[in-house]
Image: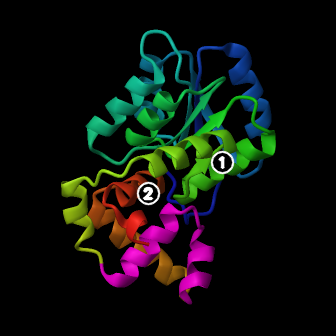
Amino acid sequence: MTAPDTPGPVSVLLVDDDPMVRRGLRLVLGGDPGLTIVGEAGDGAEGMAQIQRLDPDVVLLDIRMPVLDGLAVLARLRDRGAPGPRVVVLTTFHTDDDVLAALADGAAGFLLKDADPTEMIAAVKAVHRGDPALSPAVATTVIAAAAGRRRVDPEVARAAAGLTGREREAAVLMARGLSNAEIGTRMHLSLATVKANLTRVFAKLAVDNRVSAAMAVRDAGLLDEA
């Protein structure tokens, strides 16, 4: 995989059982000079094989597929333990359970297939940078779930107790949806310092992306304290 700060196009793998959808995604994403489509797959099992063979930076992954669905692919990627591609779940419709299950299993983004082409391109680039990418409808679901869940997870809370005051503040702002630049402005920090703080937050909370970190911040009860 190309490191987020390394110049060069972001490599993208398309995993969807509809050939017309894959063709449309190729037209949309392939026209951007910052992205390159390295392969495609028509089901989850083939997708896993392509991920292992091609090592893409970002995977656009459908949920409803034969042989192995998108949620099962996410679970397998999570269970591998090794660093893997950033995953954007792409589907025709969404349910609350699908959204939360996908994000809990490590999806970095969740977009509807009727998203605007510019939104899709921006989402791929965002998750490659380490930022979350959620369509407005999906973001509403996540926020509602966070607001509706008040039970603190003791294990996550213990991990969050190891955060410094500055790390905690940065983590809460990130969980509220602020970008690194916005966090820096709010906290009067340089972008490099914000990134360093969030890197330590990820390590202490044992997560590897902003969405999972935001959910951990929620589960630790930090949003209720802020």
Secondary structure under the numbered disc 1 in the rendered image? helix
Magenta span covers which residues?
A: 164-188
The residue drawn where x is 55% and y is 53% is 132
* Left or right position of 160 against 192: left
* Left or right position of 10 against 130: right
Which tag is nearer the camera, tag 1 or tag 2?
A: 2
Q: Where is residue 53 drawn, in percent x and y?
A: 43, 31
| Residue that extends furthest to the top in the rendered view of this protein | 66
* Left or right position of 94 against 51: right
Q: In the figure, 50 relative to 68: above or below? A: below
Q: What secondary structure predominates along the stretch shown in magenta?
A: helix
Q: Where is residue 43 drawn, in percent x and y?
A: 50, 16
In this view of the protein, can residue 57 be seen by the observer?
no
In this view of the protein, can residue 95 be seen by the observer?
yes
Numbered label attached to residue 214:
2
Residue type, mark 2 in image: Ala
Residue type, mark 1 in image: Ala
Where on the picture, by quarter, is residue 199? bottom left
Q: Are marks 1 and 2 in contact (CB under 8 Å)?
A: no
Q: Nearer the viewer, residue 187 or 17?
A: 187
The residue drawn where x is 53% and y is 17% is 64
Find disc 1 in the rendering and name its residue: 123
The residue drawn where x is 53% and y is 85% is 187
Distance in Å between CA atoms under marks 1 and 2: 17 Å
Where on the picture, by quarter, is residue 169? bottom left
Q: Where is residue 206 drawn, in percent x and y?
A: 28, 57
